Image (cartoon, helix red, strand yellow):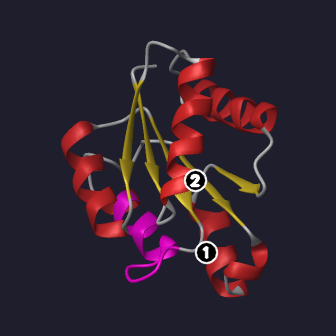
Amino acid sequence: MNSVLVIDHNAATRTALQKLLTLQWPHIAVITAETGPKGLHLAHEMQPDVILLESGLPGLDSYQTAKVLRHLPETQFIPLIAIGQNQETSNSQINGLQNTCNAWLTGPIVPDDLVKAITSVRTSSTLSV
């Protein structure tokens, strides 16, 4: 695995995820975006191996962002993991994300659960971690 894209509007969460990921996989690049549109641009440009997507993005919301990622030829096969608090997200958005993403994690994030989810989605997409 070469890179992970973290799309989250909270700077502290992006930093925490970046630290957690680089502790687990010191050789990977962690790319961050604070909005859905910036995340879409970076996903298209950088072609990360996995995308972590906050479930409560403002503006272009998480479900809309995930749908665009699934429809673009360059990003449609990149594993998506939605991360969020159920109280931040409507039921329809939760259902949409669960149907669009490869995995769903509820916060606060447990590091072992995140590592297992990333390993699982990478394995199921037949690429090695």
Circle 2 packing at 10 Å, graded few (<14), some (14-19), many (20+), is some
Residue range in magenta is 57-69
- Please identify the quarter of the rendering in which residue 36 is found: bottom left
**In the image, residue 58 lies in the stretch drawn in magenta:** yes
Q: Is residue 99 above or below residue 24?
A: below
Q: Give whichever of 107, 126 is nearer the camera.
A: 107
**Mark 2 vs mark 1, CA separation in Å:** 23 Å
The residue that appears at 75% across and 30% down in the rendered structure is 116
Q: Which amino acid is tagged 1? A: Gly
Q: Quadrant of residue 46?
A: top left
* Residue 57 x %, y %: 49, 73
What residue did someone put label 2 on?
13
Q: Position of residue 6 (x, y in %)?
A: 46, 48
Q: Which residue is mark 1?
A: 96
Front one among 19 and 61: 19
Relative placement, left or right, of 2 versus 10 is left
Instruction: Please report the residue visible at 59 percent of the width from the left and 43 percent of the height from the top.
Output: 16
Is the stretch drawn in magenta largely helix, strand or loop?
A: helix
Residue 15 drawn at (x, y percent)? 51, 44
- Check disc 2 and report its element: helix, strand or loop: helix
Q: Residue at x 62, y 49 (%)?
A: 102
Element carrying mark 1 = helix
